[in-house]
Amino acid sequence: SCGYLRKVTEAIAFIGSSDMRLRKQDRLISEKDFAKVFEAAHSKESGRIIHRPPFILYQRKTDAEPRIGVSISGRVMKRAHERNRVRRILKEYFRSDRSKFSGDIVIRLSHRPNDFAFDSVTTPLEGLRLHE
């Protein structure tokens, strides 16, 4: 019993460790941050827009560490638990390999994905060149 409790405690500590989480400074949080990315992406000089169904990616080029924001409308996905699942998957994809990204990125869902498995959600993002 004591060994099991120790393993559970270690697992919880590992999951909560800083390198397993997406830190606050790695996320776009405020409405102002999102607006800057959308504005830069539409200007084409300091950003770009990439269509990869079911996603639209907005990128603002900066020299700072990459940050991510996820926008999923209630009109696109009615159920909050599904929106949250897709949000968690996208953030984990970003967290797992930040070297693929540069600048501030907003990922917007344009329509509901068929499947909510990690690979199904992230497949459209594979091969993107967002580190330029």
Image (spheres, grey):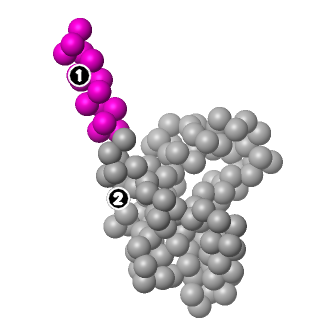
Under mark 1, the amino acid is: Arg
Q: Secondary structure at mark 1?
A: helix
Q: Report, in whole angstroms, how far the alpha carbon at label 1 lies from the one at label 2.
A: 30 Å
Compared to residue 64, the image places residue 8 above or below, namely above
Q: Disc 1 or disc 2, which is closer to the eye? A: 1
Query: Residue drawn 50% across and 45% down?
Result: 89
Residue contact at pointers 1 and 2, CB within 8 angstroms: no
Q: Is residue 4 magenta?
A: yes
**In the image, is residue 27 above or below residue 115?**
below
At 64% across and 37% down in the image, what residue appears? Answer: 82
Looking at the rendered image, the quarter that the C terminus falls into is: bottom left
Closer to the chain start, of discs 1 and 2, is 1
52 on left or right of 23: right
2 sits to left or right of 73: left
Residue neighbourhood size for the residue with mark 2, other residues' Cα within 10 Å, grouped as few (<14), some (14–19), many (≥20): few
Q: Which residues are magenta?
A: 1-15
Instruction: Please give the label number shown on residue 97.
Output: 2
Which of the numbered marks, if any, corresponds to residue 6? 1
